[in-house]
Every structure is written in C-alpha cells, then in structure tokens.
C-alpha cells in the first residue's frame, strides 16, 4: 500500500513557516512526518518549535544547532537562544538520534541532518563527486549496519535538490524556516510502500509553501532577538548572511 511521508528540516525557530508547512501537510492528508533537525536558533521561537515538533513528528534526528545549543558558550547570541529553552527542551534535544534508516518500495533509505560523518560536516550540492558519494558511507554514527543506502535525504544546507549518480539518489529537503534558495518554506514528500523491501513504485516530490515572512520578522522584533538584520536578510532574500552583496 502506497504511503506518503513528509520530510521537514531546519525550522530554526520560525513558527509562521512551520505552521504553514504543517497546514499544507494536513491538507494533503499526510499522516507521517519525519524531521531532519535544526529545530532551534536563528529565529525567535525555538521553545515553541520543539513543543510542536515533539507532538507532530514520528521521527526527529539531531541537527548541528540542536547539538551545540545544549553546550556552554561564550557567544551572547547563542546564550539568548538558550535562555528561551527549559530543561525539558535541552534533554529532548540531547536525546535525539543521529540518523534514521528504513525501507520504502525496495529502496534502503537513510535520513540524517548533515552527513554520515558528523552533524557539522557540510556537503553542498556543488561539492566534488567524491564528497557527495561519501554521503552514502556507513559510519560509526549511522551504526555500521554494513548496508549502503540507495537513497539519502538530509537537511543542513537549506537548499532543496535531488541528484542521481551511480545508482544512488541524494536529496535535500530544503529548509522550513530559513530557506536559502527561494523565499518560501520547503519540504519533501516520499511516496512508496513504507517499510517494504519489495520493489515497487516510489516518488520524491518537492513542495514549496508561501508563509507570512513579515509576521516572522515582527515576532523576532517583538522579542528583541539579536542578529535581527542578518535574519531579516535571509528571510527576505534567501541569501546566506555570510554572502556579501
């Protein structure tokens, strides 16, 4: 029986974007949601995002922000985001798994945040073929199950794409709350026979959802969030704050 799974990632404390995506998922009658991490930071409402994701998502893997926000820091901006969270939030983030494996329509699929090497190892769609093929590596973080995935999905780079090479498929779910390709929230739908190792039809679909960017900015202003201007730039232009105009 064909089933659709919504893959969301990189919400980054942006409630208007998350609400818009969840509304779209609901209107499509998709029951199963998997989140690829980075619930927190950048935007003002990390606490609310965690509470929603805990209730809405069946599986959540750990992102780099989810990791380092739980650690001591000297950076004032990160301290501000930490102060939005309580102990339950910290414990939840610390408990998140690194990756999630499953079969769909005979394909072995692996989902994680950034790469199989670390939540901090970033692989871009334009990186060398060797780097992109390393996304299919089996590592200590993925559990050494000795099965190379047919399909890998990840987040981290905030750009939705799909690439095929050497019989493998690599896709990025894009970002819900901080997209850096289009100024619309992004998520991905996998359609196939979930948890079946028998070959059958399977599809990967990319979805873009407009949301109220001005509201997202106003919420950050209301809470006097630090690094406000870089945040506004990213939401309104879909350009990374580290890139000069």
Image: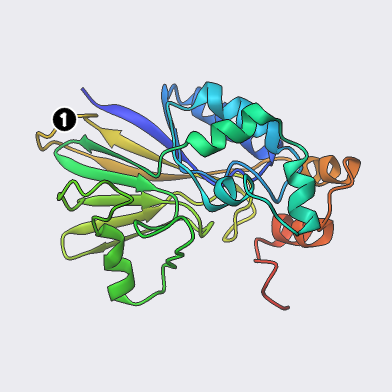
Q: Is residue 48 above or below residue 172?
A: above
In the figure, residue 111 lies in which quadrant?
top left
Whether residue 213 appears in this view of the structure is: no
> What residue is drawn where x is 60% and y is 54%?
179
Q: Which residue is nearer to you in this view: 40 or 196?
A: 40
Q: Residue furthest front?
A: 72
Where does label 1 land, which residue? 196
Q: From the viewer's perspective, is 237 left or right of 207?
A: right
- Residue placed most toward the observer, 134 or 70: 70
Residue 99's x, y, as percent? 36, 43
Residue at figure coordinates x 54%, y 25% from the top left: 54
Residue 36 image point, x, y percent: 46, 43
Helix, strand or loop at disc 1? loop
Quarter in which the C terminus is drawn: bottom right
Q: Residue at x 44, y 50 (%)?
A: 113
Q: What color scheme is it?
A: rainbow
Quarter of the image where the N terminus is located: top left
Tell me what residue is drawn at x 76 percent, y 37 percent: 84
Residue 7 position, x and y percent, is 43, 39
């Amino acid at each position: 029986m064909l089933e659709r799974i919504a893959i969301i990632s990189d919400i980054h404390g942006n409630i208007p974007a998350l609400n818009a995506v969840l509304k779209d998922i609901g209107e499509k009658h998709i029951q199963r949601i998997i989140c690829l991490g980075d619930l927190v930071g950048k935007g003002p409402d990390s606490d609310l995002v965690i509470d929603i994701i805990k209730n809405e998502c069946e599986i959540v893997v750990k992102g780099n922000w989810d990791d380092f926000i739980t650690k001591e820091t000297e950076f004032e901006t990160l301290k501000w985001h930490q102060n939005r969270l309580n102990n339950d939030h910290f414990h939840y983030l610390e408990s998140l798994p690194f990756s999630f494996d499953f079969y769909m329509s005979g394909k072995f699929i692996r989902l994680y945040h950034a790469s199989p090497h670390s939540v901090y190892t970033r692989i871009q769609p334009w990186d060398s073929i060797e780097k992109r093929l390393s996304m299919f590596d089996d590592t200590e973080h993925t559990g050494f199950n000795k099965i190379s995935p047919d399909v890998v999905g990840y987040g981290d780079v905030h750009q939705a794409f799909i690439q095929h090479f050497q019989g493998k498929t690599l896709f990025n779910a894009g970002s819900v709350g901080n997209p850096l390709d289009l100024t619309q929230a992004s998520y991905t739908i996998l359609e196939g026979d979930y948890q079946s190792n028998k070959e059958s039809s399977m599809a990967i679909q990319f979805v873009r959802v407009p949301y109220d960017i001005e509201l997202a900015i106003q919420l950050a202003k209301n809470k006097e969030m630090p690094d406000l201007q870089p945040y506004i730039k990213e939401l309104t232009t879909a350009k990374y704050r580290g890139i000069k105009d």
